[in-house]
C-alpha cells in the first residue's frame, strides 16, 4: 500500500476518533487513539504483522488457479454457477451445448486475493490489475472469505501464449500480478509459473501428434511440408510473435479432438486448407492468427462451439478462400467469429453455403468483420440449396470494400428455409452491385432483420423475400439505389429505398461516398517496411505474410492503386500489381457513418430468433446460451440495439448480443470500425455520453463502454 494512501486513512481515522468516544478503553478499539498510533508505528517500522487483526499494509496473495487444480492451459470446466467465478469446477467433456461459454476456460483464470485485515475492501470500485507480461485482461469480484479477488479472464488482443514461453527452456515464464487502486500500485504477487503443460518443438515432419495438454511451440521461422493431425483433445499450437511458419503441405493442421488451441503467423500454399477444424472438434479456441495463402481455404470449419478472435487472412491475389464454415453430415453450431480482416482473394472471403443432403449450419455469429478487395466471387456468401439447412445467423459491425463482385449475399434455392437472420451496422464502400442481397428462387420469409446499413456506391437488392424488417438508419450515396422484385412486404421500395411493410428506418439519400473512410494512405505506415508513403511500386507483390500483416492499425490492407481521390471501379478486386495501403477506419470528420447511431434504448430492444425450439428457457439455452422461450415455442435473444457484448471479460454468454446483466460496447458507427484506444465508460465520451442501462425494461443492468477515440 502507498504511504500516501495509508496516511489518508490515518487522517480520516483521527477525525473519526475525535468525533466518536471509544466504547472500549483498549488498544484494540478502532475508535481509540492507541489503535491507530500502533498501526502508524508498525507502518513506519515496516512491520507487516497485524495489530488486532488489522494490518497497515494491503496484502496480495500468491497467484493461484481460480479453480483448484486447474493449472493447465486448456483446462475447461462446466459453466454451471451464477457467474464465471462460482462454477462447480466439474470438468467439461466436449458434449456441452449452447456455445463456447457452456464451458469456462479455467486454465486461463489465475487470481490473487486482496485483503487488509478487518478493513479489507468490500467493493471493487477503483481496483484494477495487470501483469509483468502485459498479457491478460483482469476482472474484479468479491472474495467469498472477505476482500476482493482479481482474476485473469482472457489474453489481450495482440498477445500470444507463445510469447510467455522461454524459448531456451521451453517452459512458461514466471508471471507477476500487479494490483492498482485508482491507478496507484498498491500491491503485487510473487512471480510464479502459471501452467504445467509440457511444451515441445513443433515437428516439421508432421504426423499424428500429442496427448491431452501437450503444446507445440514455434519460436523461429520454420518450414513445414507435411500434414499434422491432432486426434486427442486439449492440444495446442503456440507461436512467438516474431516467428513465421511457412507451410507447403496439402493440409497443414487438422484438428479432430475437442478444446484445441491455435495462434500464429502463417505463410501458406496449401491447395486444400491451411487449418481444418473437423466436426468432431468442438470448443476450438483460435486467436491471433494471420495467414497468407495462395490457394484452398485458410480456415475450413466443420466443428461447433468455437471461439475465433483476431484473425487476419490474406489471399495474396490468389484463388484462396478465407473462412469456409460448412457441414459434413452433422450440424455445425454456435461458432463465434470476432475481429476478422479478410480479403485480397479470387474466391469468397467468407462462405457459409451448404447444399449436400444432411448438411446443417445453425446459430453462427460474426462481429467486427472487414472484407477488402475480393475479385471473382461474392465477398461474403451465406445460403443453402437442396435440403441443406442454414438458420439463426448474426452479422454485425461489417465493412465490405472494393469488392469486384457482389458484397454480402444471402441466397437460397433450398426446399427447406434459410431463415432467422439479423444483420447490423453494415457499411459498404465502392463495391459492385448488389452490395447487400436477400435472394430466393421462390417466395420465402427469411425472417430478416436489418439494423443500420449504408451503401456508398452500389445497390441494395431483395428478390422474392417477404416480411423483411429494416430499422435504424438506411443510407445511400449519390448513384446508389434499391432494387426489389417479388415478395410480400419486402421492407424497402424499389428505386427510392423508401420503407415498406414492417420497416421503420430513417432514410438518407444522395450522400457523399468520398468522405467517410480514411481510404488511400499517402504517408508511410509506421509498421510496414514495404511501403513508400503508403505505396508499393513494383508489379511483383511479395508472397510474404509480413507484407500483408504488418500494419499500424487492424483496419489497413493492400488494394489496387489509383491516382483518383474518388473511389473508382479500378480500385476493386485483389491487388496483384501496383498496390496501395487502404485504411478502412473512419475519418474523424465523417458525418455519414461516424456517430450515426443513437445511444442504446432499453425500451426499444430487438428480438433475434435462433435455430431451435423449446418451451422453457433452459431448453432454448441449450441451443444458444441467452435464448429464452417465446410464443409458439420459438427461442429468441432479446438484445439492445447499437451495443455489442464485450468478450473475454468474465461475464455474459459470449454470443455477441448485448443482453441484461452484461458489459457492452456502444457501437456508434455504421461500419466494422467502432473507435480505437482505451475502453472507457460511454458516459464520459462526447458527443453522446451514453449512460448505463438500469432496471425497469426487458433489458436491464447493462454497463456501457466506448472507445475513447472515434475516427482518425
Image: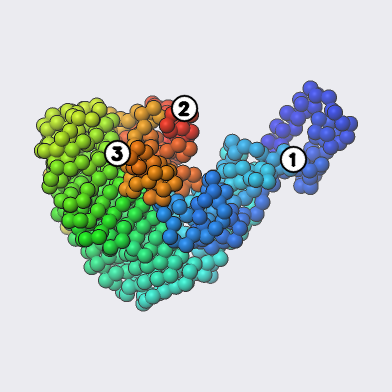
Q: Residues within 10 Å of mark 3 (few under 14, many from 20)?
A: many
* Gap between marks 2 and 3 measured at Cα: 25 Å
Q: Which residue is mark 1?
A: 118
Question: What residue would you read off at disc 3?
Answer: 424
Q: Is residue 237 visible?
A: no
Q: Secondary structure at mark 2?
A: loop
Upstream in sequence: badge 3 or badge 1: 1
- Who is closer to the viewer here, 123 or 63? 123
Quadrant (top left, top right, bottom left, bottom right) of the C terminus: top left
Q: Nearer the viewer, residue 471 or 444?
A: 444
Give the residue at mark 2: 696
Judged from the image, the secondary structure of the residue bearing numbered disc 1 is loop
Q: Earlier in the sequence, mark 2 or mark 1?
A: 1
Q: Is residue 512 above or below residue 656?
A: above
Q: Residue at x 38, y 37 (%)?
A: 639
Residue 187 is situated, as x and y percent measured from the top left of the image, at: 65, 46
Mark toward the viewer: 2 or 3: 2
Amino acid at each position: 500500500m502507498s504511504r500516501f494512501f495509508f496516511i489518508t486513512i490515518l487522517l480520516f481515522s483521527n477525525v473519526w476518533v475525535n468525533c466518536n468516544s471509544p466504547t472500549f478503553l483498549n488498544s484494540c478499539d478502532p475508535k481509540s487513539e492507541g489503535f491507530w498510533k500502533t498501526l502508524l508505528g508498525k507502518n513506519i517500522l515496516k512491520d507487516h504483522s497485524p495489530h488486532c487483526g488489522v494490518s497497515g499494509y494491503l496484502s496480495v496473495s500468491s497467484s493461484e488457479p481460480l479453480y483448484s487444480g486447474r493449472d493447465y492451459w486448456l483446462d475447461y470446466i462446466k459453466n454451471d454457477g451464477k457467474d464465471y467465478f462460482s462454477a462447480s469446477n466439474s470438468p467439461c467433456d466436449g458434449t456441452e451445448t449452447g456455445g463456447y461459454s457452456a464451458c469456462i476456460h479455467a486454465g486461463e483464470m489465475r487470481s490473487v486475493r486482496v485483503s487488509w485485515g478487518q478493513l479489507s475492501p468490500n467493493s471493487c470500485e477503483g481496483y484494477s490489475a495487470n501483469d509483468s507480461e502485459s498479457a491478460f485482461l483482469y476482472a474484479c469480484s468479491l472474495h467469498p472469505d472477505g476482500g476482493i479477488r482479481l482474476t485473469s479472464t482472457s489474453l489481450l488482443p495482440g498477445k500470444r501464449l507463445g510469447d510467455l514461453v522461454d524459448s531456451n527452456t521451453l517452459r512458461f515464464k514466471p508471471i507477476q500480478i500487479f494490483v492498482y487502486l485508482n491507478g496507484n500500485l498498491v500491491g503485487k504477487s510473487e512471480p510464479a509459473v502459471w501452467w504445467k503443460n509440457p511444451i515441445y518443438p513443433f515437428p516439421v515432419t508432421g504426423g499424428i501428434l500429442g496427448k491431452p495438454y501437450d503444446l507445440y511451440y514455434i519460436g523461429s521461422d520454420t518450414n513445414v511440408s507435411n500434414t499434422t493431425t491432432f486426434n486427442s483433445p486439449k492440444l495446442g499450437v503456440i507461436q512467438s510473435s516474431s516467428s513465421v511458419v511457412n507451410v507447403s503441405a496439402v493440409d497443414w493442421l487438422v484438428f479432430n479432438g475437442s478444446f484445441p488451441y491455435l495462434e500464429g503467423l502463417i505463410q501458406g500454399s496449401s491447395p486444400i486448407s491451411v487449418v481444418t477444424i473437423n466436426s468432431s472438434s468442438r470448443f476450438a479456441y483460435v486467436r491471433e492468427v494471420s495467414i497468407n495463402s495462395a490457394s484452398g481455404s485458410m480456415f475450413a470449419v466443420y466443428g461447433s462451439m468455437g471461439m475465433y478472435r483476431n484473425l487476419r487472412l490474406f489471399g495474396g491475389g490468389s484463388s484462396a478462400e478465407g473462412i469456409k464454415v460448412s457441414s459434413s453430415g452433422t450440424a455445425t453450431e454456435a461458432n463465434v467469429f470476432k475481429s476478422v480482416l479478410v480479403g485480397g482473394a479470387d474466391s469468397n472471403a467468407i462462405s457459409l453455403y451448404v447444399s449436400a443432403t444432411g448438411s446443417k449450419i445453425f446459430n453462427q455469429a460474426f462481429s467486427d468483420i472487414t472484407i477488402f478487395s475480393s475479385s471473382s466471387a461474392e465477398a461474403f456468401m451465406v445460403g443453402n440449396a437442396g435440403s441443406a439447412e442454414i438458420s439463426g445467423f448474426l452479422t454485425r459491425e461489417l465493412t465490405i470494400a472494393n469488392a469486384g463482385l457482389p458484397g454480402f449475399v444471402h441466397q437460397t434455392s433450398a426446399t427447406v428455409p434459410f431463415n432467422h437472420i439479423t444483420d447490423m451496422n453494415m457499411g459498404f464502400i465502392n463495391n459492385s452491385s448488389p452490395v447487400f442481397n436477400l435472394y430466393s428462387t421462390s417466395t420465402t420469409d427469411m425472417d430478416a432483420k436489418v439494423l443500420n446499413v449504408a451503401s456508398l456506391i452500389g445497390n441494395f437488392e431483395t428478390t422474392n423475400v417477404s416480411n423483411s424488417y429494416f430499422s435504424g438508419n438506411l443510407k445511400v450515396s449519390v448513384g446508389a439505389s434499391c432494387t426489389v422484385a417479388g415478395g410480400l412486404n419486402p421492407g424497402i421500395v424499389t428505386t427510392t429505398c423508401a420503407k415498406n411493410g414492417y420497416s421503420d428506418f430513417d432514410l438518407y439519400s444522395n450522400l457523399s461516398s468520398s468522405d467517410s473512410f480514411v481510404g488511400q494512405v499517402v504517408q508511410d505506415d509506421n509498421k510496414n517496411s514495404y511501403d513508400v508513403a503508403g505505396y508499393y511500386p513494383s508489379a511483383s507483390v511479395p508472397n510474404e505474410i509480413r507484407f500483408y500483416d504488418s500494419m499500424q492499425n487492424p483496419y489497413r490492407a493492400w488494394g489496387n492503386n489509383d491516382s483518383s481521390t474518388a473511389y473508382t471501379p479500378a480500385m476493386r478486386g485483389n491487388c496483384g500489381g501496383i498496390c496501395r495501403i487502404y485504411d478502412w477506419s473512419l475519418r474523424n470528420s465523417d458525418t455519414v457513418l461516424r456517430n450515426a447511431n443513437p445511444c442504446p434504448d432499453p425500451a426499444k430492444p430487438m428480438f433475434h430468433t435462433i435455430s431451435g425450439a423449446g418451451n422453457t428457457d433452459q431448453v432454448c439455452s441449450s441451443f444458444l446460451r441467452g435464448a429464452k422461450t417465446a410464443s409458439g415455442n420459438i427461442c429468441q435473444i432479446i438484445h439492445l440495439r447499437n451495443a455489442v457484448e464485450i468478450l473475454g471479460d468474465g461475464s455474459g454468454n459470449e454470443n455477441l448480443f448485448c443482453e441484461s446483466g452484461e458489459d457492452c460496447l456502444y457501437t456508434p458507427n455504421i461500419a466494422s470500425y467502432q473507435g480505437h484506444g482505451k475502453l472507457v465508460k460511454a458516459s464520459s465520451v462526447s458527443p453522446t455520453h451514453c449512460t448505463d442501462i438500469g432496471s425497469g425494461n426487458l433489458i436491464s443492468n447493462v454497463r456501457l463502454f466506448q472507445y475513447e477515440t472515434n475516427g482518425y
